[in-house]
Structures are given as structure tokens and as C-alpha cells.
Image (tube, rainbow, N blue to C red):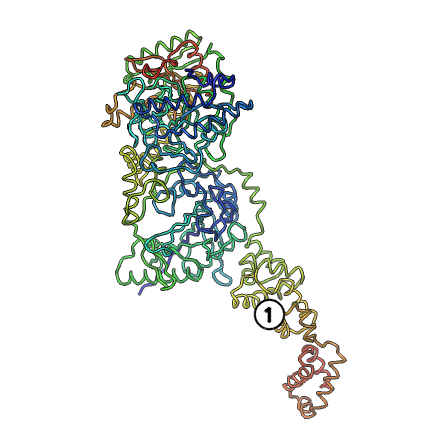
Amino acid sequence: MANGVAEIRRGLKAGKFSSVEITQDYLARIALHNPALNCFISVTDEIALAQARQADAALARGESAALTGVPLAHKDLFCTDGVKTSCASRILDNFIAPYDATVIENFKRDGAVMLGKTNMDEFAMGSSNENSYYGCVANPWNTEYVPGGSSGGSAAAVAAGLALGASGTDTGGSIRQPAALCGITGIKPTYGRVSRYGMIAFGSSLDQGGPFARSAEDCALLLQTMSGFDPRDSTSAEQAVPDYGAALGQGIEGLKIGLPQEYFADGLDAGIGAVIENAIEELQKLGAVIVDISLPNTGLSIPTYYVVAMAECSSNLSRFDGVRFGHRCDNPTDLEDLYKRSRGEGFGAEVKRRIMIGSYALSKGYYDAYYLKAQQLRRLIKQDFQQAFDSVDLILGPTTPETAFKIGAKTDDPVSMYLQDIYTISLNLAGLPGMSLPVGFCDGLPVGMQLIGNYFNESGLLNAAHCYQQVSDWHQQIPEAFR
Amino acid sequence: MSEWESVIGLEIHAQLATRSKIFSGAATAFGAEPNTQACAVDLGMPGVLPVLNREAVTMAIRFGVAIDAEIDHHSVFARKNYFYPDLPKGYQISQYELPIVGKGRIFISPAEGERREIGITRAHLEEDAGKSIHDKFPEQSAIDLNRAGTPLLEIVSEPDMRSAKEAVAYARKIHSLVRYLEICDGNMQEGSFRCDANVSVRPKGQEELGTRAEIKNINSFRFLERAINFEIDRQINLIENREEVVQETRLYDSERDETRSMRSKEEANDYRYFPDPDLLPVAITDEDIAAIRAALPELPEQKKQRYIDQLELSDYNAELLTANRETAAFFETALVSAPGQSAQLANWILGDLTGALNKASLETSESPISPEMLAQLISRITDNTISGKMAKEVFESMWQGEGDADAIIERRGLKQITDSGAIESLIDEVIAANADQVEQFRAGKDKVLGFFVGQVMKQSQGKANPGQVNAMLREKLKT
């Protein structure tokens, strides 16, 4: 079957197949494989088929928008009008939003078909998708391994061919890390590029939506639809969105790419290092100029991130109180009991840990030492990048220090889990765009390479990735069981 | 017994008169069916985001400019975190470290001729919470989120007031100002203007402040005065009985006229303030401030000075007339119809009219006597159509809705007799009928003149001009 968004669009327009046909295909694949992978929390068959019929009608009239008839999946933290939006949490297991997130609205506007809502770490808190009320997602390359997180369901669905593309969100690496672990392409745009309206918040100053797909070309298409200023999100950027497709294929002759020494230091798996080296050589063959650089404050990014993200989430998650929506405990004896039991029963362990740490960091007497200090460090981390971009066009490194790990391997060691995000997290702190693309395998598991761009240089990232994908086929690899 | 000094600071919450809420497009009108004016943002639904209503910022700056305050170019919204069912997000969006309005000041006149400067520490924007209703359903509490997200300006004073009376004068002054600025309707019953009072006492002469109590739930100026006085007495009693004043929040109960403990300092929440990452810092340019300053109406202080300088009113009358926008507007409208009659108008407005309004519990805007009607009445006194005494009667009739002054004077035949021929014939009649009294007057008994005036007025049914009668009688009796 065809496996690219661009290819499917061409086929639909040419009338080679209908949207209903491919949607049925995907729904059948989901029915077949989802029990083993668990990447969907909700499968929206009826909506998908209705949207596909509409798409076919539009195509028949010769009216096609950017994604008319293309079946996609959405991370279950984008609110979807009339469809359960759970954030993979028990506390929202019964929550049906009465509105669409802007991202969902944009996909509807452009004619895309929604296959379902994908599994994730609860409230996007995790790097393995093990923190889901609906159970862990399996990595399609080896179902005993994690797919990464938090957008693990979206990444696994695309990798296994259960959707052509999927939306995700990235607060500390939640698009790039699962993309890397599942061998697909994913991009986290500049903070403010994609509206956060209707995207249930984890860390508001870090969260950013973005797409997963097989290729950079497909990511460009999906990102085009997702991006744009939204008056309902005060932090969204009032800046024109370039034509990402047009930026592809411009070549990378003379492009200066910086390799931060800190991203290749201790802690990086040697196998991954070697795979990345090969990819760098390919890029050099394409004309890229490789420059050694330093991002000296990289080591501070994890502690800084966890203070900021946990502080923000401790407040963001206060609205889940059992009063107006979501889980409410049975027979509360008084208000305090209602709060304590509803939240106690509704939230999983990792979410509780983060709320408690975040509340502590914001407490009187600790605020200056933690939150304020973290904000200062955040500025230093940002300055590192700003200085680097004075001399290079892009920054390159591994997406993760290791390939996918076995389910359960790190559940008792949160710090080791947090270290998964060492290369991805600083971009969120700085608000920069980054993407991960597959560049090889290590012991049968995919390896992701991260490209980092300056603010609003998504085009530069997509172009470089696309150039690489023109001379490699890692992104076209499909796990055997799902071919 | 030593002498005590009370120290009072007020926190005033003025609801800003924007059409929509501070962070959503929902309407702010009072009195709608419960939960009909709350959108997804006000309900704190998952994923929704606040968007600042710039009108609220403009209104806050209007206030800042009017109290001569520092206004920073950069202001930040912060989250105040606490759980309560009528606080949908589990935090209130407020301001903490960088409020929109910095240090300012205002002048009060607690008594005639007195003028005191009261410092204003800051004024910041925040959203209101919803309302919890505990008495509507048995065993259950109800929540109305119509008010959630309504913009408030919290105005925090310095602890500069030394008596309940001063505190009331300050609160009234702020109340008057926000109404002059048209940023708040000032309706205390509907909760558009609320006061919390911080009260402490210390021995006179002591520099250090005593332990303070914060009194909440005060919804009228009268209660503000009572609550503060109750609290001052309570604290003095405690200290004199060698008991401790504890730092706490107290509720004022107007039915029992007392304050009682709500929560102590130990039970106070740690609000875990931090800048709201959903909102960008508010940027305010010098041009913004200049434009707002240029659009300010004449403020009470300026108006008062103009009344004194140009209309030659007394300091006291000028203060009273400008104490609220409606009274000043009434006065100025009336003055257009009765030019040059400022002193008379002031006396009538501050005397008879205010008295009648108070008695009927009416606002100036609800007065059955319009400014034009009052101006006409005064003009009739000035042009000698009626006497001051008759004017009171005409005023009463106008109040009862019997028409304007001219119509009443006409209908009742109240027109004063100023025709000297007519008065002379009346005088002649009276003199002829009272020969004895004429003798007495001529013998030097001056007091008898009053008797003659009375008789002439009686003959004229009160319509003769008393001044004229007086003068003419003297002439006639001499000869």
C-alpha cells in the first residue's frame, strides 16, 4: 500500500482510489494491529467514514483542500468536539469536550479524516508511554519495547502504518523522542507556531504541537495545516506561515551544521554515535559544512526543565478537581474529601509526583531558589543557542542517548527516565524548533537524529531532512509484522 | 488607660465596566440566569486559554493616571493558586510582582476644611471568582459562574487612615473617582464595589504597627464605618485585658454588627504565585498613557477647584457638589439654565434637593425635579416672581410631580405682587384700619413695623414682595 501523505493525495486527486477505501483500509489495519500495540485510546470509525465520504464528494466536485481525504490520528490531548479526550488519565476518562482544539479545527478545515485518538503518557508526562491509564503502547519494531513518550501512540501508529500521519505534542521531547524510538519523522515547531488552544496543557511555556509522519515531506504538509496565528492563544505567533513544501529540495550545499560537543559526550550510546556519524557523512556528501560548537549549559537543562514543567503543571492540573467535569469520587463526605479522593483516584503516580514537586518549587520560601533560578538558567540555555546560531545554520545531534528500552526497565528510576530527554529538552526551554528523523538501526531498533533550527526556521529543518531522505531510505522502513 | 491610635488600610475591589470578561468574550451583565454567562474559558475547561481584554487594561490605566500613579511599561499577570469550587481553574489570574498601577495618591476631606493625602500602594487587575450558593438546595451547594472572569481592579491603600471616618471618606473618594472615570458603576449592592479593611491599633506615639485583622464582607459605607469601629474597640479591649490580637481574616456580620474570625494566619493558603505562562506580559507605551490621559474627564479635584475659583463657591459646597459625578452634572446642567446663580443652586441642591432625595432613597439621576426645573425655580426667586418662602412650596409641588415652577406659580396664583400701586393701596387700607398702632410707631415704637408688614402680607395673601412692603411701609408711616 501507498505510505506517504503526498502519494495518497496524488492518488485521491487522480481518482485511483477513494478516501472511503483507504480509510476502511486503515480502520481494518487498526482493528488488526491495535490489540497488540495499544496505540489508540479511541477509534472513531463512524466519524472517519463520514469525513471520508465528505472528502470523496468534495474531490468529485473538484474541490480539494490541502489534506482532503487523508486519514490521520490525533494525540488524545487535543480536544475533539463530541469525542472523548482523556489525556490518558482516569480523571478525564469520561470527558467529552464540547469544542475542537484549533489544531483539530485546522485539520477539519483542510479536509483530513480522523481515525481516532492516540494513547500517550498521562497528561503528556513521561518518556515511555508507560504512564497511561489505558496501558503502555508497544513499539512496532519490537513489542516488548517502549515506543517512547509522551506521544507514543501517535508515533507507534504511524510507524506501524495504522495512520498516514498523526498529531503530537512536545513539552520536553514528546514528539522527537518517540519519533526516534519508532523510526519515523517528527517535528516540534517553534513555540508559538502551532496554537495551544484546546491542547490540554502540561507545561504551558514549553508545550508545542507538531506532526509525525514517515517523511519530512509529509511533515511539511501536516505542519502547514497545523500552523498559524490563533487569536485564542495569546502565546501564538502573529507571523506569516511560509510554504513549507516550497522550501523542500533547495539543497544543503554550503549549509553550516554545528555539532554540539555536549551532545556527543559521555552518556551517548556508542552504537547510536556511530549511526549518527554515518548520517553526518551523508550530509557532508550533500555539501553541508560541519562545524564543532558548544552549548555549555546543556547539563543544566534537565533540572531547569523539571522545575519549570512541574511548577506549571502543578497549577495547570488544578482544574481537574471533580467539580465540573471528569472523574468524581463516590459519595464525598465534604469538599476536602471530594478534592482529595477525586484527584487521588483520578491521577496516576507520575502525575502526582510532578504536581507535588511543582507545588513545592512554587511554595513560599522556595520560589526564589527553584522557580526563579530555573527562569534564570532558562535564559542562559537560550543564550547558548543564540550564540551558536550566530555561526551555524542548523545544529545536529542524536535525538536520544539510547534506543528504545524494554517495557518496565526504567519505571522504578524516574531520574534515568528523565535523562532520556537530555538532548531534546533544552529546545523547549529555548522555544526553538527541532525535528527527529530516522538515520539507521542499532540492534534492530531505530536511531533518530535531531536537527535544531533557529526561531521559525522550520523550513530549514524540513529541507535538510528532506535532502537526507532523498539519498536514504531509513524513513521508508516498516517493521516486518506491519508490512 | 492609655490613648490608642487606630491604623487602617483598605483594599477595594472595583468591578470594571467592560462589556465582556477580562479573559473571555462572555458578557458581564449582572443578574442573568445562573451559568448563562460563562463560556468554556470561564468554566476552566481543559485546553482553553485566556485572552486579555485590552479594555480592562485601559480602564486600569485611567485610574492610575487619575491618582497620579507610576505606570510601568511592563506589567505581568500571575496565577494565585488555591482550590475552591467557584474558582474553576484552581487558580485566579491576578497580578503579583508587576501590577499595572504603582504608587499613587488621593486627597480626602474627612471634615470641613480638612485635607489629607492617602497613599495608594498599587492597583492591579484580576479576574473575579464565581459565586457559591449554599442556601438554595438542601444538603448541596450550587455554583454560579456568571461572575467568574469579571474584571476587577484591586486598589490597595497605604495604612494611612486613622479612624473609621477617614476610611469611609477615602472609600467614598475612590468610589466617586471610579464613577467619574466611568470604569465602574459603583453599585455596592450588586458587589461592583467591595471593601476589605485592614485594622490595627497601637498606643499613640508608637511607631511600630500593631497586629492587624483583615475584615471582609463589607458592602456599604455605613457598614464599613461600623465594622471598623467595632474592630477597633475589640482590639483595644483585648490589649487592655492583656490578651493578644491575632493576625487573621474576620467577617463582618451586619445583622449582629460584629466581626468574627474566618481564618487565622496559620490557616492561610500559600498561593504559590507565579507568572501566568498563558499570557504575555502587558506592554504599555508612553503613547498609550498619553492618549488615556488626554481622554480623561475633568476629575473631582479639578472640578472642585474650578467651582471655587470661577463660580465663587465655598470650599465646603464645592467639595460636596463634586463628591459624586451625578451631583456635579446636575449642578452644571442647572447652571446652564440659570447662569450666574451658582450659590443659590448649590444651596438648593445640597439642601432641599439632597434632603428630599435622601428621604425618598433616590439617586440624583432618579430625581423627579430636573436640573432645568430647579434652575427655573431659582430664576423665579431672583426675578422676584416669588419669594424664597413660596419657592419652598413650589419645590414641594414640583417634587410631587405637579409640573414645572412656572406652571405651578401660574396655577396657584403665587405670583408675587411687585406693582407698587397695588402694594400702596393695601398699605393704605391697613394704616387706615389701625390708627392706634400708627400712633405707637410714630411715638418711636419701632417694633410695630412688624405688625404692619404682617397685616399687609395677610391682605395680599402672602403674595406681596416682603422687601418692597417693608420699605414702602417705613416711608408711609413716617409721614
| B265 lies above or below A288 | below
Residue A187 visible, this angle: no
The kind of residue tagged 1 is Gln
> Between B326 and A350, which is closer to the camera in this rendering?
A350
Front-most of residues B391 and B293: B391
> What is the quadrant of residue A448 in the picture?
top left
- Find residue B121 and report its horizontal and vertical position in percent: 43, 48
Quadrant that contains the C terminus of chain B: bottom right
Quick one: SS at disc 1?
loop
Chain holding disc 1: B
Residue A249 x, y percent position in the rendering: 48, 13
Vertical placement of B332 versus A126: above or below?
A: below
Work out whether A438 lies above or below A78.
Answer: above
Looking at the image, which residue is at 68% across and 70% down? Answer: B407
Residue at far right of view: B421
Residue B270, by quadrant, is top left
Circle 1 residue: B400
* Residue A285 horizontal side relative to residue A148, left or right: right
